[in-house]
Structure formats: structure tokens, C-alpha cells
Image (cartoon, grey):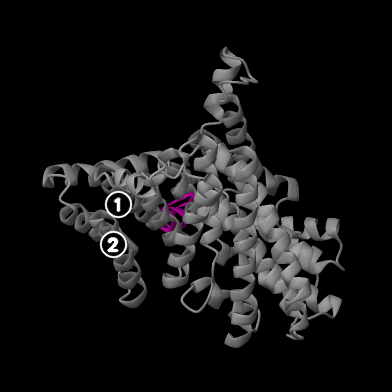
Amino acid sequence: MWLAVLLLLSIVFIIVSTARYGLHPFLALLLAAFGYGILSDKMSLKELVEAVNGGFGDTVGRIGIVILAGAVIGTFLEKSGGARKLAERILAWVGYRNVPLAMGIIGYIVSIPVFCDSGYVILAPLAKALSRKAKASLAASAIALSLGLYATHTMVPPTPGPAGAASILQADLGLVILWGLLIALVSLAAGWLFAILVAARTPIEPGAEPEIPDVAAAASDGPSALKSLIPILLPIVLIVLKSLGDLKEYQPFGTGGWAQFVSFIGSPVVALLLGVFFAFLLPKKLTREMLSTTGWVGESVVAASIIIVVTACGGAFGEVLKKSGIADVITQQLGTGASTSTSLSIFLPFAIAAALKTAQGSSTVAMITTASVILPLLEPLGLGSATARALTVVAIGAGSMVVSHANDSYFWVVTGFSKMTVRQGYKLQTLGSLVQGCAAALAVWALSGIVL
């Protein structure tokens, strides 16, 4: 039982050190890895160092370029005006009377490569302008946008959190994207219903100031909607095609040269780099400054590097847990080993991620830490198959939404840009993220009963 107790103490240490004392997650995860490894007494000091180095390096090797490329795509989509152009097109399609639905769909698409905080800052003026035009409360459109952004931010790579969790759990990225998009749709629907049934009852005036007097005119300077969509959809389609091609029982592309080509362009690194190429076509004129260390690419690298380091430290912690033999301990405690009910097991990663998210605020840290903890437990919990690993990543993402409150920077972005009081923020953003996360968890549970 000492290893289980030590694991619990390690999680508590990560929560307290980051939430209460402001320690950077990079340090918290590394200290937890070394502390757990030393106190577990299951490996020599040399083996511990090798486990930390190996876990860190392997994780960076699997996911570093993917996160970097995703960050570059998001930055170019944001700064070129492509995100706003996409928003204008979706609004024309859905209709200006269905503002909450339109904002939710916009958030769902934009947040695949763009951080939800940045996405909200970009699109909040649009939500205000449309609410003013529809003479409706800002609360419904603001919360629909917030929860729409949250849905894919937590469950669909190449957003760093789910991408990092997939890397640590060695899950197929294509399967994670496939199931993540599906569960995120359920989550989006739950968020939209919450927005129109609950948030709409809270009166928040969008204000009279003309942040965006004409939506179409505001988007006219950006690239076309189709051009803006290509850097997002192309990598997703290629990665999913590769995952389908790797299914040995079906082999839809055969085993020859065509299959090898699909496997190459569908590998996450190549697919995301192709997305970067099309992102470079978004600005009216691509300049050297944009590609420099101080330009758009440089900003992307700086933003992504922090996430990569935190993810790699999570990988190091997970490797130490794996080498300590805690999986055998859990197997003995469960008594059933791999026969454990998957339908119940899938709730464990959700619960751990939700506890971490609520305690320390960061969805990304919650996902990375939970993936590290769950890694050695996959087989004992009956979650070792490719599909089960992918669904585990999505379950972790669902948990990382529960809940957004005062210790979450996104909470303050949403409340600040939508003119909510703190009390209204708890009533709408916090409760909305709870509803959305639980809906996603139930969807994962139902899906696991069908596909596992």
C-alpha cells in the first residue's frame, strides 16, 4: 500500500505547490518524480535518473514538433484575421438570430489550434456586437462561445493539453482526434443548451459602444473562410486517415506504396507541418518579420515551449511511476486485473483530472498530471487497447473542464470580456463547465460500452 499512499501524496504535493505556493508545474512535476522515485525504494538512484531522462526525452520526441506546429497555425489564424473570417461565414450559415449556436460552433472550430483564452479575446467583441444587434442578453452568446472554445480545447489535438496527454499515454493521435471531435460535439450541445436555457435568463447588457459595427466589414480584410479552414482541417483529416490505414484488420489503403504514402503524410509531424505551410498563406503578404524570432513564429515558439516542457516533465513523472511497479500493486488491489469493467474504469481518469483542475486551475496541468498517473494503470484498469487509450485521453479532457472558477485564468478572461460580475461568473462559467464536462464524461462512458 505504500506505493499507493506515496502516489496520493505526490498528487497532493503537485496541487498544493502549484495552487497555494505558485510553484511552476515544471518544478512541481520534476520534484514529484524524484521524490516518489526515492521514497518508493523500487529503483536505484541511477535507474531513477534514467527513468526521468527517458520519460522526458521520449515525450518531447513524440509531441514537441506537434505542439510547436499547432501553436504556429493558431497564431497565424489569429493574427491574419482568419479566425474572424471563419466566424463571419459561420454566422451567415447559422443565421444572425441564432447567436448562441453560432458562437458555440465558432468556438468549437477555432479552439482546435488556438488557445481558448486567445480565442475568447478575439471573438468576444463579435459576441457583444451580435448580442447588441439581436437585442439579447450578452450572457447567452458569451457562455456559448466560452464553452464552445472549451470543448475542443480540452479534447481535440493539436491543442497542447490533449496532445500531451495522448503522448504520455502513447495513444494514437488520429483516434484521439476522431473520438475527441465526436465527444466535443456532445459537449458543445450541452454547453449550447446551458447557454440558451440558463445563461440567457441572466441580463447582461452588451453595451452601446460599437466594437464591431459591421461584422462583414470587420472580417473583409482577412483571408477567405475556406483558406482559413484548410490549416485546421487538413492535418486532422490526414492524421485520421493514417489511423484508419493502420487498422490491420481492414487495411483500407492496402499494403503497397499508396499505404506507405498515406502513413507518411498522415504522421502527426508531417500533417501538422503541412498545416503550417497553408497557415503561411493566410496573411496578405508573408514577411521575414513574421517568420523571425520576434515575429509570429517566434511568439508561437515561446508560447509552445512552456507547454512542451510541462508535458515532458509529466512524461518523466509517468515513467518513474511505471518503473516503480505501481501497476502490479493496483492489479493486486483490484483483484481482477485486466478484467476490470472498462465502463467503470473510464470514470477514474475523469475524476482525477476534475479534482486536479478544480484544485489548481490549469486544464493543461490537470491533463498532463492525470495522464502521468494513469499511464501505469492502463492495463490493470482494462484500458490498454488503442481505442481505450484514445478514449482515456478524451475522458481526461472532459475532467479538465470541471470546473472553471477563480483559480483559472480563463474564468477571468470570460468574466472580464463579457462584463460579468464574479457571482455571475460562478453561476454561468463555473456551472456551465460542470454541466459540459459531466455531459462529455457520460458520452465517453456510453461510447466505451459500444466500442470497447
State yes or no: residue 318 in magenta: no
Quarter of the figure with residue 25: bottom left
Residue nearest the observer in this picture, 271 or 376? 376
In the image, 258: left or right of 16?
A: right
Of marks 2 and 1, which one's residue comes earlier in the chain?
A: 2
Q: Position of residue 402 (x, y in %)?
A: 54, 67
State yes or no: residue 291 in magenta: yes
Mark 2: few, some, or many residues within 10 Å (few <14, many ≥20)? Answer: many
Do we see residue 430 in this rendering?
yes
Q: Position of residue 416 (x, y in %)?
A: 59, 81
Residue drawn 78% across the image and 60% down it: 88
Q: Which residue is mark 1?
A: 317
Q: Which residue is mark 2?
A: 10
Mark 1: few, some, or many residues within 10 Å (few <14, many ≥20)? Answer: many
Asked whether the beta carbons under mark 2 and mark 1 sit within 8 Å of each other, the answer is yes
Residues in magenta? 287-304
Q: Residue at the front extreme?
A: 335
Residue drawn 59% across the image and 39% down it: 235
Q: Position of residue 342 (x, y in %)?
A: 52, 45
Which quadrant, please, contains the N terminus? bottom left
Comparing labels 2 and 1, the label whose residue is closer to the camera: 2
Helix, strand or loop status at disc 1: helix
Q: Amino acid at mark 1?
A: Phe
Residue nearest the observer in this picture, 48 or 1? 1
